[in-house]
Amino acid sequence: MAAAILAMVPSYISRSVAGSYDNEAVAIFALVFTFYLYVKTLNTGSLFYATLNALSYFYMVCSWGGYTFIINLIPMHVLLCIVTGRYSSRLYIAYAPLVILGTLLAALVPVVGFNAVLTSEHFASFLVFIILHVVAFVYYIKGLLTPRLFKMAMTLVITVGLAVCFAVVAILVALVASSPTKGWSGRSLSLLDPTYASKYIPIIASVSEHQPPTWPSYFMDINVLAFLVPAGIISCFLPLSDASSFMVLYLVTAVYFSGVMVRLMLVLAPAACILSGIALSSAFDVLTRSMKFQLSKLFDDGPAISGNGSPNGSSASTVNTSSSKNEKTEKSEAAPKEKQSKKNRRKDKEVTESVSVKPKKEKRLSVLPLEASIVSTLLLIALGGFYVVHCVWAAAEAYSAPSIVLTSRSREGLHVFDDFREAYAWLSHNTDVDDKVASWWDYGYQTTAMANRTVIVDNNTWNNTHIATVGTAMSSPEKAAWEIFDSLDVKYVLVV
């Protein structure tokens, strides 16, 4: 059910529809698949799934820079399990291979390289990795030593562990202090401190996708799922397991990050779909069970046949009268013997009735009336139909138009603005292949793809110096701007 909801959620369609196909379309699959394999390893304790989890994490690193969300969320869940006393060998198998193998594979990606072990985004995974091994060692020696020796060993382990932790923290502090941004990237700092980008990195704050969302954005991107998610959270706590606690933690962090940047609504969408699927599955389970129970009870208690209305009523009455006479004679003969047995039978009946009443009451608590079950089922089906209609509308109207062709509607009809495509076509037909084009970074990818020309800055925005230089040239007088563009070997300037 969660897969069907996720397949049409507008937030995901915005990144996977034709004309807007982005790397997040692949990355979200890798994100969800990594979380699935992590939970699968938690439930099974299989090293095979742990290895697949590391490979899926490597796929995520190759796809999108948002892989740091995985390498911080999973350590948070491991630490939560340790603090709440839910440590097990399955938790160790699920996390340790991911850190070792996943980090080694991530370092093979050219864009990441040694940043997989040198940046602050990855330090939490290493710190939790050390804590996990300390806890595993404590549980191991606890099974080998007597309680007295275990207390002595615990004192030694705590002393050595604190010394190692202080040494690791000191090294990390030294590495972080040597970086002007404390080892964090600009986007990560803007997530942890929403005011950081507007203060120090205006280019990040200037992007519309990096602005905080409005309340209508949630209804636009996840629609009715916003009302189903709380019910899914309640279902996760009944009962609470390692997998359900991970889902709750995933949702909480995704809600926070989506509240800082509207583009991270894409990360919230899978969590909302999964919890909504859990809520709908639990609701349909209760409703269908109630309808089945009520209908079976209705048919079982159907037309009751009385003794007088039966065709053999006279014979039945004669049998009853004759049997009553025989019973009277038998009772007069064996009355003293049966007194004690009747008392015992009454006691047995009282005990069995008192025991059987409780499960009947418990079953009745989870069974709804037939009318309420039918109405609730129809309302949920109608809610799902409304969700499908909204998703189709969002895909057709909001997310299907290509970004290089703009459309608008008025009383005269549909208007198409084709200026971007015409500009790229002019560059493609009237300039040399080796010519360099200067434009604002928003149009970098489109110029490269549509016009097949080299640009100075593009949407990657990794070189802030070049972006600042182009911005200075565009805001300067013509003479100063010409000198700046000439130093960059620019032949054409694209202004749309």
Image (cartoon, rainbow, N blue to C red):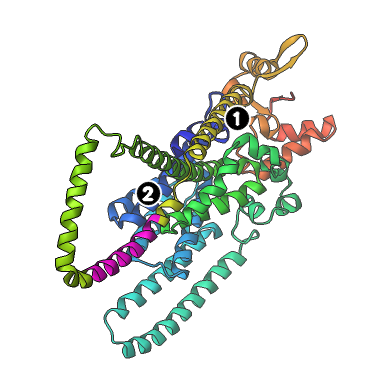
The reply to whether residue 408 is in sight is yes
Compared across the picture, whether 365 is left or right of 15 comes to left
Give the residue displayed 63% in from the left and 49% down from the top: 187
The majority secondary structure of the magenta stretch comes to helix
Q: Secondary structure at mark 2?
A: helix
* Residue marked by disc 2: 37
Above or below: residue 258 compared with residue 16: below
Amino acid type of the residue that numbered disc 2 sits on in the rendered structure? Leu
Give the residue displayed 59% in from the left and 59% down from the top: 183
Report the mark closest to the observer, 1 or 2. 2
> What is the count of numbered marks?
2
* Residue marked by disc 1: 445
Q: Position of residue 72 (x, y in %)?
A: 51, 57
Amino acid type of the residue that numbered disc 1 sits on in the rendered structure? Tyr
Q: Toward which corner of the image does residue 189 lie, by quadrant? A: bottom right
Q: Position of residue 412 (x, y in %)?
A: 77, 8
Q: Position of residue 253 (x, y in %)?
A: 57, 53
Q: Which residues are magenta?
A: 342-360
Q: Toward which corner of the image does residue 463 lie, by quadrant? A: top right
Above or below: residue 411 compared with residue 268: above
- For the residue pair 138 and 188, the one nearer the viewer reads as 138
